[in-house]
Amino acid sequence: MHLTYDVIVVGSGFSAIAVTCNLIEQLPASAKVAVVGDDPGFGRGTAYRTELYLHRLNVPAGRMSLLPHQPDDFVDWLKSHGRRLQAGDFASRGDYGLYVRDTLARLLRKREGRCRVDFIKAKAAGCVERYNSTLAFHLGNGDEIAGKTVVLCLGVGNATLPVAPDGIPASLRSRIIENPWRLSWLRRVAPSDAVCILGSGLTMIDQVLALRAHGHAGKIEVLSRRGLAPLGHAWKPPAPLPIDVERLPNTISGILKTLRAKSRTVADWRAVMDGLRPATQALWQRLSGEERARFLRHALPWWNIHRHRVAPDVFDRFEKLVLDGTVRFHAGFLKSLGAEEGRLAASYRVRATREIAEIRADWLVNCTGMERAGISHSPLLKEMSRFELIVPDPLGLGIQVDAASEVIAPSRISPARLFAVGALTAGQFWEITAVPDIRVQAKAVVEEIVSRG
């Protein structure tokens, strides 16, 4: 089968659903759209499929509407479904996944006056330029489709273990949880089992609270390179401190010095971070490639814990477990995974020393987060790179796009237009993995598609 579409959306996560909803709203009824992805939970992605109530959004509900021109939509949805939450509250991620699904369904129910949308449950395996001014995709089911415009909405997967668990007997191998979002593993954990978690970011907090919710009462050891954990939102958020990006230095060291100085002038450092939030993309684009690389090497862990904060009640629950010694942090570099006396053993070099230490546990959980967006994780992107249809970002932050999110590929000869939305565009925008940013980008890309016909 070979079909030609006006727009092809490649992907099945939040970015794909945001683009699709905007296409339905903006394209004429004569247009044809294909959405290609093999994830059965289309649009919800890993984060929004969880049903545990403690797994919360990290952004207040009032900033999470799918369509930016309908800012109260999510809060209204919560109220209509009996959730007693206000705009400043943090909704559950499971509820947000249902809201995203319902929003798409509502737009699709409008049969008259909207474009045709075909959902194709298949993996795009390859892409080639066609003589009829289109980009054609070979699908895993054997079909081929072509599009005059293509929007890549490919996210990132769970990061792999830092070291291979070679030589661990099968009896223990099943106790290494490489993808913690498959929550069925929690039912196998005994209340007194010792757990070692690799990684200390947001995923770690989610898994700690999930363990407690499932009756676990044992010790939890957390190992990460710096032993840093995310901080919490304030119960009463301070007003953001306005920051003029144009007056900030052009070096990471200079920027940090300025932000620290500003933090000393306010009652709550969050005012500085929240003031910087709207200008982060502009600040990133002012930095040279060298300064961006310096940020990734030296400042990223501290940026993450201050920028990507957790709901205040969730943070309080987690902090109590840290204070009573249930959760303990270790800073160091994982060297090997093995088995000792019937238990898993994680050997690591203690940070800033040559000392080698070991954590023994009944379970080892990979919470090192999501892999950085790039070409290597996707067979499709590797194929497109080989044919020079896309160009990798020099820092490994996805692929090269311009300020309008259009893919930069000098070797491509087809007039077909190619865009990217979401994590793949981090090299250009940096802050482009959260809903408030992606929804604005998705709307802007669709407006650009519509304006150019």
Image (spheres, rainbow, N blue to C red):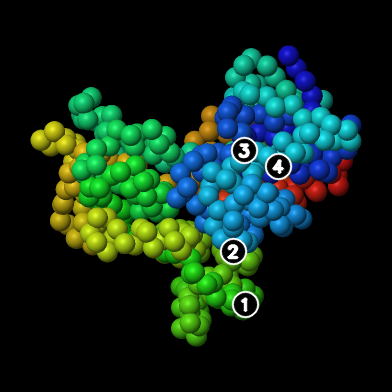
Q: CA distance from mark 2 to mark 4?
A: 21 Å
The residue under label 3 is which amino acid type? Gly
Q: Depth check: 86 or 204 in front? A: 86
The residue under label 2 is which amino acid type? Gly
Residue at 71% x, 48% y: name it: 442
The residue under label 1 is which amino acid type? Pro
| Residue reaching furthest to the left | 341
Residue at 68% x, 49% y: name it: 80
* Side (left or right) of 278 relative to 148: left
Residue 192 location, quadrant: top left
Marker disc for residue 43: 3
Q: CA distance from mark 1 to mark 4?
A: 33 Å
Say if mark 1 contacts mark 2, CB within 8 Å: no
Q: Residues within 10 Å of mark 3 (few under 14, many from 20)?
A: many
**What is the secondary structure assignment of the residue under circle 2?**
loop
**Residue 123 image offset from top left, x and y in percent:** 59, 25
Residue at 82% x, 25% y: name it: 132
Mark 3 or mark 1: whose residue is earlier in sequence: 3
Q: If the image is split into quadrants, where does the C terminus sit? A: top right
The mark lying in front, picked from 4 and 3, is 4
Mark 1 or mark 2: whose residue is earlier in sequence: 2
Q: Can residue 35 be spotted in the picture?
A: yes
Mark 3 or mark 2: whose residue is earlier in sequence: 3
Say if mark 1 contacts mark 4, CB within 8 Å: no
Q: CA distance from mark 4 to mark 3?
A: 10 Å
The mark lying in front, picked from 3 and 2, is 2
The residue under label 4 is which amino acid type? Thr
- Residue tagged 4: 103
- Residue tagged 1: 242
Q: Depth check: 294 or 316 in front? A: 316
Mark 1 or mark 4: whose residue is earlier in sequence: 4
**What is the secondary structure assignment of the residue under circle 1?**
loop
